[in-house]
């Protein structure tokens, strides 16, 4: 990209009404206006362009970013580490096993204690329905209070690295991938998306990806079909919200009962396993009682039910029904004959899309960096211009 | 703060006789002269002021800080990470579980092996009487020898992040909090402090905080009363040292047998649980024999004894006896009805002091940074002046 | 060192044919030409000299270095952290326990997912014969493919931090130590080296150090004797390779059956325990079957066999047979009466060489930094010159 093209992109960014991002956390995409989301996508693209041109977008000389992973993570962990490092922050992981939290400390207290020099707090807490999002909001309220009380010298921004409701760093990366594959944000309009349940030998995968997709994609004019077997419905309010935002944005959203139907004529397919919402609710309650037997019984029952839907697999045969669709997945996928005997996708389909899938994942560090950038910088376009002007090399 | 005021503070610092800090470790506050401690407090304040004014006090372009936590930690871990990051060092944690130390390696060897590019080593080792401080001294001797032998290119400074005897980063942060709450170091003089034992449902908390307080506060002219139930005495030599330093500094120190007596007319109260010294000694010996039954028996016996003193709780009733005292705690506190059924402090008292308590904790990163700064920089005042002059932004 | 001397060293470096290092991984020393190895040694020395003169050789403003330790490590972990930090990279550890790798993810996928902003990947995988090296090659192929496919914006360099075959960061550090002790790389020629097995109460130590030594030292004109008890032979192809490279470089290599014979007239001795190759092969197979009983039986059998060779200990008596030899060890050593009842070396010998042993270990951070430098920078000599010219301070 020439300096002239870069400046044109920055000028376009400056016209977006995105000041609402400043000083705010990023919990759910539907907390943000579409223009704000477009600004995040555009900042992510510009940051990527800067790095590819060996220009360092460093915002800080020093500062901490706190990460808290209440569930395993590889790509989100490394994406967060990469984003923070690019901007000049050092990640310090809050490992609850090594802390005094077991001591009976409150969320309010811990949140302040880790934040004296923290600019960002990234949290993954996706396993228990009704918990993850609430936890993140509590952390944000605690540091907001701490900042107002003069306890904290800066207000750390909370970034949702996957909660029980949404997975915005994933779905925004997915969207940026689509924009790049299709050739522009305006190309999203009218595209048909199949967000479909798919079989996996494990039960209990989070709902946040499908929920995030149906809450986000219709807002860009896409026509989203959500398909799942009986009993695998998502959270009611998320579905209601998806319907509403589809209606107001020119996109559409509807639910169907088979992968085949959803795939018919689709431009984009996103077949992925998740647990039934009701099961996740039950599981959350059982976990609280620490009843190991009840948990084992639930697992047995769910796996048996799951097994009825082994036919929900993304195969070449199904792909043939689509409009030469692009296959998406948040990775890692359960690939038939590779990572499991029967899974979400056939090895043939996966192999064909391996490279675009990896590129899809590669947008996440930039999305996270853009979310941080937009929250921390009052005028992102102006700051990006000055970063271009100062022209400091990343590789020196 | 105006640049003029900043320069005045730096000028005042330059008049302190604090060259004895240079090149030295920080183990115990009573290893240092009062003027040296005042210099550390003043450097901490200036570093805080610099950061608040967005001036980066970075001392290093690269360099490691090694942390070793032999006990759980949240606030000290993050304080150390924050302090090192502010000064330009990257923390590398020595996790004994992931190292070859089990291999039978000596302290001397490990200390050198981790220090080839280390500027600082921060250690928490507080659980076993007669161990923690000794371990830190051994580490310091090992790296001193390594430096003299040409094995190490620099001599890492050892910082005590809590040992069996003292917890200097905590008590110095406590003191800086008092200075800020009261309006100056000279205001400490004559203030009455109640350092009191308090009930907790857990036994076996370290002695380092009460020992650190009685060893430090009287040196600034404060009148410290130490209160504890029969059998909960501290280490003899620490008490003897507290008496001696109180006598020579114009402050005072005396022991009393009830929280009520200590609180009477107090300006500052610090009610906190600790284990009886004799129990900690016994526990250390049992741990060495790996006799699980003896350890369980000791715990049972101690908890039963502990339970006799449930009345030692900081309540509004007791606070009413004080001179409108400021409540201190190193956190996390055992709060009645919040983190336990019966604890060190009532929820009412704790809630009233929550904000100042969080501010108290917030000084720790600056105290640690100041300890490092004073040990590493030959003329701290001159260096701070040049940092003000170079005026590099932390948020760029 | 004067600036003039520094420039002379850089000029000498510029004459080495070392462009083959650029853009390449570092798996095995015998993948590299002798001139390339000399270039790495020289870059390491210059980087050390720069740091000692407080000149920062930072190459990056931001960037990740990924570490993956599949076996415990202290000195290599800290050496890698130190090297990356010196060059401006932030280490992010891939902890397989905290990742989704258990999820059934392929090496190809994980390697790309962690590498979006990674410049270097350092791997230790030394325990299973036929696995470690293969794993590293697979990771390198995966990121090479990812880079070619446009998934990765840069190609991370893979550095072998110890595999089942070689331990190049160790043996190159050993060699740099010898160069400094003897007074120049040309002094290595003709020196007699005893690489000898030694008794240890543990069985199953990796073969990579002795294999690395016999594959590297003869290439610099050294005469290497490899001594071990019956049954403790190394991998056939490594031995064959050692013979071949000794023949073509003017050094020599031969195998003998006693420590005494190897030590006779030796200038350098390297007595160290390792497991018989055949045992390591058997162990690898058993580990795959997860047969705990078979593993315990193997251990019992091996320890019994091991115990026959307690006489293989480096003592003063044996040292007296040498030509006033320098004692080497990769540390930690099994020291008789210190870390075990009977071990690889007597306390007297170890104590006499403690300081040089620690210095030996101290070269590892610089060797790792040099491997990274040589792989990342097209013209190392020119870049080092510009680093000298820009003269940025490490301690600011």
Image (cartoon, coloured by chain):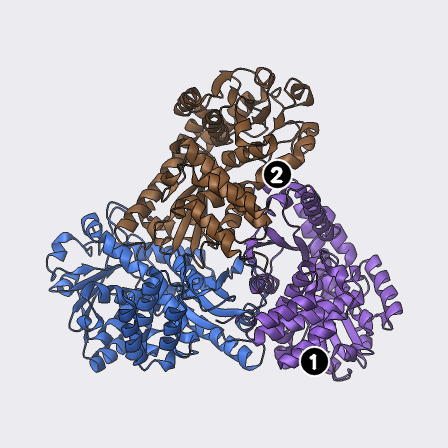
Chain colours: A blue, B purple, C brown
Residue A37 position, x and y percent, is 31, 75
Residue identified by numbered label 1: B181
User: In the image, C33: left or right of B133?
Assistant: left
Residue B338 visible to the viewer: no
Residue nearest the viewer, comparing A69 with A262: A69
Vertical side of A329 occupied by B349: above or below: below
The quarter of the picture where the N terminus of chain B appears is bottom right
Vertical side of B157 occupied by A243: above or below: below
Dot 2 crowding, Cα within 10 Å, few <14, some 14–19, many 20+ = many
- Furthest toward the front, the residue is C4
Q: Which mark is residue C359?
A: 2
**Element at badge 2?**
helix
Q: Name the chain under label 2.
A: C
Closest to the camera, between mark 2 and mark 1, is: 2
Which of the 4 quarters of the picture holds residue C16? top left
Residue C219 visible to the viewer: yes
Dot 1 crowding, Cα within 10 Å, few <14, some 14–19, many 20+ = some
């Amino acid at each position: 990209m020439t300096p002239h093209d870069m400046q044109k992109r920055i000028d376009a960014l400056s016209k977006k009404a995105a000041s609402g991002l400043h000083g705010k956390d990023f919990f759910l995409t539907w907390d943000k206006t579409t223009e704000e989301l477009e600004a995040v996508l555009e900042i992510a693209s510009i940051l990527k362009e800067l790095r590819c041109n060996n220009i360092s977008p460093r915002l800080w000389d020093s500062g901490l970013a706190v990460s808290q992973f209440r569930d395993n993570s590889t790509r989100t962990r490394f994406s967060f580490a990469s984003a923070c490092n690019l901007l000049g922050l050092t990640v310090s992981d809050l490992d609850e096993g090594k802390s005094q939290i077991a001591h009976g400390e409150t969320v309010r207290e811990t949140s302040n204690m880790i934040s004296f020099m923290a600019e960002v707090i990234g949290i993954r807490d996706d396993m228990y329905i009704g918990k993850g999002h609430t936890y993140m909001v509590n952390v944000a309220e605690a540091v907001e209070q701490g900042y107002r009380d003069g306890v904290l010298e800066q207000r750390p921004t909370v970034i949702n690295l996957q909660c029980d409701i949404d997975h915005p760093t994933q779905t925004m990366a997915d969207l940026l991938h689509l924009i790049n594959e299709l050739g522009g944000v305006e190309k999203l309009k009218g595209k048909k998306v199949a967000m479909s349940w798919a079989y996996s030998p494990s039960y209990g995968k989070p709902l946040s990806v499908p929920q995030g997709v149906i809450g986000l994609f219709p807002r860009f004019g896409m026509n989203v079909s959500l398909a799942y077997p009986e009993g695998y419905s998502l959270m009611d309010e998320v579905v209601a919200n998806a319907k509403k935002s589809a209606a107001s944005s020119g996109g559409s959203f509807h639910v169907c009962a088979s992968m085949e139907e959803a795939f018919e004529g689709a431009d984009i397919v996103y077949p992925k396993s998740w647990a039934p919402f009701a099961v996740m609710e039950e599981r959350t309650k059982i976990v609280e009682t620490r009843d190991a037997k009840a948990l084992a019984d639930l697992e047995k029952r769910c796996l048996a039910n799951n097994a009825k839907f082994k036919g929900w697999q993304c195969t070449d045969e199904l792909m043939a029904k689509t409009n030469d669709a692009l296959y998406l997945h948040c990775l890692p996928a359960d690939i038939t004959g590779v990572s499991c005997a029967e899974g979400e996708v056939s090895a043939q389909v996966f192999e064909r899309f391996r490279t675009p899938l990896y590129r899809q994942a590669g947008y996440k560090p930039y999305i996270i960096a853009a979310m941080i950038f937009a929250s921390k910088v009052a005028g992102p376009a102006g700051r990006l211009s000055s970063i271009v002007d100062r022209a400091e090399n990343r590789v020196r």
